[in-house]
Image (cartoon, rainbow, N blue to C red):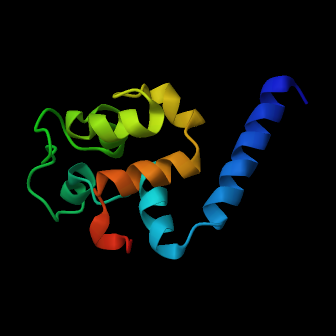
Amino acid sequence: MDVVSTYLTVTYCRRERDLLALPRQMLRPVIGVLTGHSQVQRHLSLMGLSNDPSCSYCSEAIETTSHYLCRCSYFAMQRATVWRKPFLDLADIDIVTIGDLVRFIKKSHRFSSSIQY
């Protein structure tokens, strides 16, 4: 096994372990953000539950999970608190730890209706 394959295997095993350790009420929003199947406007509009896929926080773009996680200016402060930078690149998502993702979701209160604090 080469170095990259070993790194990816260790990284995904760590993510799997960290996901399995999450309480159920936190697992749902984390999996939703990682897969894109979350209560963001784009997904809700695809399901016919919303008429407007635009971000209701910044109105700058269509609200996808990658927009929420990486680019939404409304959540820049929370991103800077967790990752020490206000905006993430899509490549950064591969190295985001589950713990940091949980901290960001909690700090943003974006999915607070499904999370009990």
Q: Would you identify the image quadrant in which residue 84 lies?
A: top left
Q: Would you identify the image quadrant in which residue 19 lies?
A: bottom right
Who is closer to the viewer here, 105 or 62?
Answer: 105
- Above or below 33: residue 48: below
Where does residue 77 sit, x and y in percent of width and height?
29, 36
Q: Residue at x 78, y 41 (%)?
A: 9
Where does residue 44 sit, x and y in percent of width and height?
22, 59
Q: Is residue 35 left or right of residue 65?
A: right
Q: Residue at x 23, y 44 (%)?
A: 63
Q: Is residue 66 left or right of residue 49?
A: right
Q: Is residue 1 visible?
A: yes
Q: Is residue 73 left or right of residue 34?
A: left
Q: Is residue 36 visible?
A: no
Q: Residue at x 57, y 35 (%)?
A: 94
- For the C terminus, which image quadrant? bottom left
Q: How many marks?
A: 0
- For the N terminus, which image quadrant? top right
- Above or below 89: residue 108: below
Where does residue 28 sit, x and y in percent of width and height?
45, 67
Residue at the far right: name it.
1
Q: Is residue 23 left or right of residue 4?
A: left
Q: Residue at x 10, y 38 (%)?
A: 59
Residue at the far front: name it.
81
